[in-house]
Image: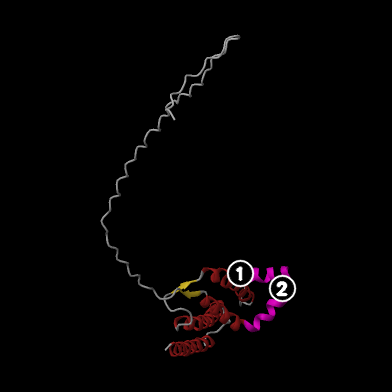
Amino acid sequence: MYGITRATATVLGATAAGFLLWLATQVGDTTTGGYWARYGIVAGAGLVLALSQLLGGWTKWGMPTLARPVFLFAFVPALIVVGWILLFHEPGTTWFSRHAVSWSGDLGIDGFVNDLGAMLPALALGLGLVFGLSFDTAGPRVREVPVETYDQPAVAAPPPAPMEESPPPPVEEPVDAPAEPTYAAATAGEPEPEAAPRNEPPA
């Protein structure tokens, strides 16, 4: 399906561009108005060719949007160069054409610009094509399905556990040191007392 759509859009774009090119031949370029009308129509043919690919699914479908980087860094420089050459070859003497001729001579490019006079239709067609390529598509819109969320009842946090009181440290009672035996000092010259006799049973 994609190939058929693109082929159909290409055929229609080429047909429309061919018609515009034929229409441009019916406009004289001997006057200033006819000159710009002719090459404006030729530029429109290039724009139709680019849009046929864009609308035919060449990129990502979706609505065309202007790609600013391509427009600024591709189309604007092309517009300046092609516009300069077209002004250089404009019939008659307008303020713009006089300055284009004068500035080309000052820059030393008047011979180069003069040689491109035979390629004015191709330059205008290419300018329209670059302008058409400045558009892009952001793709089809994707519908976002909201995710259903269920409200859950708030769960109260459990109360903090009571702090256990630590038992007081045991009190160590002082232990009395055993009394040391005392011995009576023997008095010099006195006999030591005899031990008490033991009552032993008779044999």
Q: Is residue 117 magenta?
A: yes
- Return the mark for residue 109: 2
Q: Are marks 1 and 2 in contact (CB under 8 Å)?
A: no
In this view, the residue in front, 203 or 60, is 203
Quadrant of the image occupied by residue 77: bottom right
Residue 61 in percent (x, y) is at 43, 79
Residue 14 in percent (x, y) is at 50, 88
Disc 1 on helix, strand or loop? helix
Q: Which residues are magenta?
A: 96-119
Q: What's the residue type where badge 1 is placed?
A: Phe
Badge 1 density bin: few <14, some 14–19, many ≥20, Cα 10 Å: few
Count of numbered tags: 2
Disc 2 on helix, strand or loop? loop
Vertical placement of residue 144 versus 116, above or below? above
Residue 193 in percent (x, y) is at 52, 14
Quadrant of the image occupied by residue 149: bottom left
- Residue 162 horizontal side relative to residue 192, left or right: left
- Residue 169 horizontal side relative to residue 21, left or right: left
| Residue bearing mark 1 | 96
